[in-house]
Image: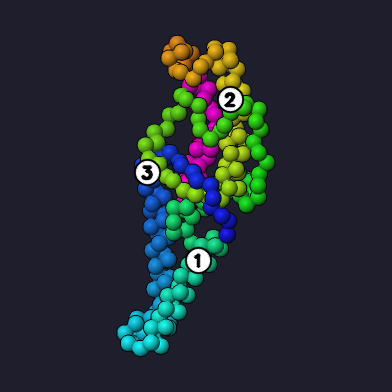
């Protein structure tokens, strides 16, 4: 099982936030059904009614076995009953769909622009994302997402175009330093840049 040591904060729509919550709730119900079936097979309810030390010991053994079963299924990638697990699984599916191995350290994205792809430059975003999803994911997944963002169609070209635009117009990071026409032009460029957040949001659509 990979260590989930990289915290991420994804800006999402309310729909996406609810979608993840529904997926996790469904996984919890699935885990509960598995636990109930195991308990029935091993007569947990009947044993709990027996007031002896031996019966109490058997109850503890059964409950421990159920916890171990859930842990084994999580480690095998068959149970996703927490936000961390659900988001990690969504990202794993997204990276595979993009031809990247989520479990192998990817090559770092080029540092040609000297900028980060973690967030979109100011302006250009047309997606309303009022909600947040916090999760911890494997470091290789986070690195893979950064590469996936850079490899997205048109991203590299848009980054270079943005750098040239900012240098040409001496953009200082404040929107009011540009006249409305130039600001609109810059927003059009940044809208064509794919960020890690864009990849994360696409990944969440793979939870079904």
Mark 1 and mark 2 lie on one chain; the one further toward the N terminus is: 1
Which residue corresponds to mark 2? Answer: 158
Q: Residues within 10 Å of mark 3 (few under 14, many from 20)?
A: few
Q: Main secondary structure of the magenta part?
A: helix
Question: In this orientation, which residue lies closer to the viewer: 121 or 78?
Answer: 121
Does 21 sit above or below residue 117?
below
Task: Compute the Cα span from label 2 to label 3.
Answer: 29 Å
Classed neighbour count for the residue bearing mark 1: other residues with Cα under 10 Å, few (<14), some (14–19), many (≥20): some
Residue 188, how many percent across, how many down? 50, 22
Residue 15 locus on image (x, y percent): 37, 43
N-terminal-most mark, 2 or 3: 3
Dot 3 lies on which element?
helix
Q: Give how far apart the Cα atoms at labels 3 and 1 are.
A: 29 Å
What is the secondary structure assignment of the residue under circle 2?
Answer: helix
Depth check, mark 3 against mark 1: the one in front is 1
Residue at mark 1? 71
User: Quick check: marks 1 and 2 in contact, CB under 8 Å?
Assistant: no
- Indicate whether 180 appears above or below 138: above
Residue 196 sits inside the magenta stretch: yes
- As helix, strand or loop, the secondary structure at mark 1 comes to helix
Magenta-colored stretch includes residue 156: no
Residue at 39%, 67% in the rendered image: 32
Region rendered in magenta: 185-208
Q: Which mark is residue 15?
A: 3
Q: Give the number of the mark in front: 1 or 2.
A: 1
């Amino acid at each position: 099982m990979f260590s989930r040591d990289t915290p991420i904060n994804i800006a999402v729509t309310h729909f996406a936030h609810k979608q993840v919550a529904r997926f996790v709730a469904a996984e919890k119900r699935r885990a509960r059904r598995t636990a109930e079936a195991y308990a029935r097979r091993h007569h947990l309810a009947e044993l709990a009614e027996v007031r002896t030390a031996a019966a109490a010991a058997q109850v503890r053994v059964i409950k421990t076995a159920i916890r171990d079963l859930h842990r084994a299924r999580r480690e095998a990638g068959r149970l996703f009953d927490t936000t961390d697990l659900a988001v990690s699984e969504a990202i794993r599916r997204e990276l595979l769909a993009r031809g990247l191995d989520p479990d192998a350290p990817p090559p770092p994205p080029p540092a040609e622009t000297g900028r980060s792809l973690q967030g979109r430059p100011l302006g250009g975003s047309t997606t309303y994302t009022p909600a947040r999803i916090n999760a911890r994911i494997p470091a290789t997944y986070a690195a893979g997402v950064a590469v996936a963002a850079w490899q997205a169609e048109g991203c590299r070209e848009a980054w270079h175009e943005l750098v040239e635009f900012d240098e040409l117009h001496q953009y200082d990071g404040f929107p009011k330093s540009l006249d409305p026409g130039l600001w609109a032009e810059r927003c059009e460029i940044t809208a064509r840049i794919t960020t890690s957040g864009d990849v994360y949001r696409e990944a969440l659509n793979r939870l079904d």
